[in-house]
Every structure is written in structure tokens, then in C-alpha cells.
Image (cartoon, rainbow, N blue to C red):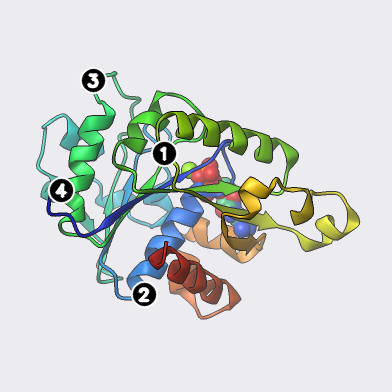
Amino acid sequence: MNTSGKTIIIASGKGGTGKTMFAANIGAAMVKRGHKTVLVDMDTGLRNLDLYLGLENNVVYDVSDVLNGVCRIKQALIKDKRFPGLFFMAASPKPDDGEITPLHVKVLCDKLKKVFEYVIIDAPAGLDDGLTIAMGGADEVIMVITPEYSSIRDCQTVTMTLKELGIRNVYYILNKINTKLMKQGFAPSLKEFPKSITERMIGLVQRDENIHISTNMGVPIVFMKESYISRNFDNIAGRIENL
Ligand SMILES: Nc1ncnc2c1ncn2[C@@H]1O[C@H](COP(=O)(O)OP(=O)(O)O)[C@@H](O)[C@H]1O
Ligand SMILES: [Mg+2]
């Protein structure tokens, strides 16, 4: 198939690690670097990406409508008028009824990749069917982890499951870093992370209340103002271009 773009899935073991925050900001960083990008929310039933992008009032059709043939792809694509080049497709607010397969998602991703340079998918946390389905079109997977032993363990478990699905292009982002806690020994330091994770780490994101505020305000922080956070996301976006 004549594809040009790439599909990147944002996943995690635990919930609340910052997947949706990361998806919104890395999508925004890609757009700032001149790449036409679509953010697709596949956290069916627990969608949040519309809120973090401030597009909740623009949603008419969602991914499930596209996959079930209720509407065409174009009808479910929301153009972010504030940021030219950024598009969004919402998740269904209802859990799936079991009709959608990874192949349906692969076909959708292949079609989107003809139009977009990056298709970034916000996947559900954990190991259930929703993750397998969201992985249907994966070219690369980025797992968002936090400096907690439980997050590391869950991330290793999900990485094993991905290997069983034949997905090996897995990279890691360490989010919500609190250097003070790390130095005091109250959070695992990078030395304590398994090598399999640190060798494939493509970015570190500090815990910063400005990030939390931006998700509540519905504007990705990298679009708000130049800061160390936007420079950090720009560097991560550069690494993703070279994966
Ligand atoms: N680096 C960070 N610093 C501060 N707050 C963060 C950071 N990353 C995420 N958060 C906050 O943590 C919460 C969970 O993030 P979210 O992206 O919704 O997680 P997930 O999608 O993995 O469940 C949100 O309130 C978000 O604002
Ligand atoms: Mg989320």
C-alpha cells in the first residue's frame, strides 16, 4: 500500500501516567515542526483527549462511527482551527460492543497515513482487548511511564504482551519526574530502571504544575508559550522523526 506517514501508539501499563497529556503535546510539537498530524483517541469509554485539546464541543462523529461505517473518515476529522496542520478524531464515549477488530484499525490507519505524516493514537491503559485493537496499525509504540515501581512493573508486563503480538518497536517516555524525590531516594532513580527500558528511553518530562494546568485549560502546553517544556517536547519530536 502506498503509505507515507507513520502510526505511533501512546500506551502505558498503569492509568494516569500521562498518555493523553503526552499525545496532545507530541502531536502539537509535530505540527510546530511542520508535520501534518492527526491525533486519534482510542481510549474508548474513557476519552479525555478532546478535553486536553479543548475540542469537546466540536465532536459530532467519532472513531467508532468511522469503524462501524456510520460516517466517512472525513466527517469524523476535526480540524483544529487554532493550529493549522493539527487534526483530531474523538473516541466513542461508550465502550465497544466487540465488533471492532485490530484489522479495522489497521485499515483506518493506512488510510490516514496517506494524508497525514503522523497518526498518533491515544490508547487505553493496561492489557485488555482495547489495547490489542488500538495496536492494529502500530508502526511504533511509545509507553509513558512514571517513576514508581508499580509503573515499571506494569510497563514490563505490557511490553511482553506487545512482543507476543509481534510489536518490537517500543520506546519509553519517563513522565512526572520529581528530581527532589529521586535524590532523596523516595522514587526510583534512573539507575534502578531495567536496562531494557533505559536503553530505549526517548524523553524525560518533569512533573510541573503548568502541565497540569494546561490539560485543564484545554490547550497543549507546547502551544501556550516558549518554555523549557516546549523545547523538551521539540527535542523529543526530533527523536521521533529519526526512529
Ligand atoms: N508532567 C506532568 N506534570 C504534572 N501533571 C501531569 C504531568 N503529566 C500528566 N499530568 C497530569 O496527570 C493527570 C493524568 O494525566 P493523563 O494524561 O490524563 O494520564 P493518562 O492518559 O495516562 O490516564 C492529568 O491531571 C494531567 O494533567
Ligand atoms: Mg488518558
Q: Callout 2, which amino acid?
A: Lys
Direction right: furthest residue? 184
Q: Which mark is residue 99?
A: 3
Q: Which type of secondary structure does the marked residue at label 2 adopt?
A: helix
Q: Which mark is residue 111?
A: 4
* Residue drawn at (45%, 42%) of the image: 168
Up the image or down, 70 lies above or below 138; here it is above
61 to the left or right of 137: left
91 to the left or right of 210: left
Q: Which residue is mark 1?
A: 167
Q: Observer-nearest residue: 23 or 118?
A: 118
Q: Callout 3, which amino acid?
A: Glu
* Residue drawn at (49%, 27%) of the image: 127
* Separation of marks 2 and 4 at Cα, in angstroms: 23 Å
Mark 2 vs 4, N-terminal side: 2
Q: Observer-nearest residue: 170 or 105?
A: 170
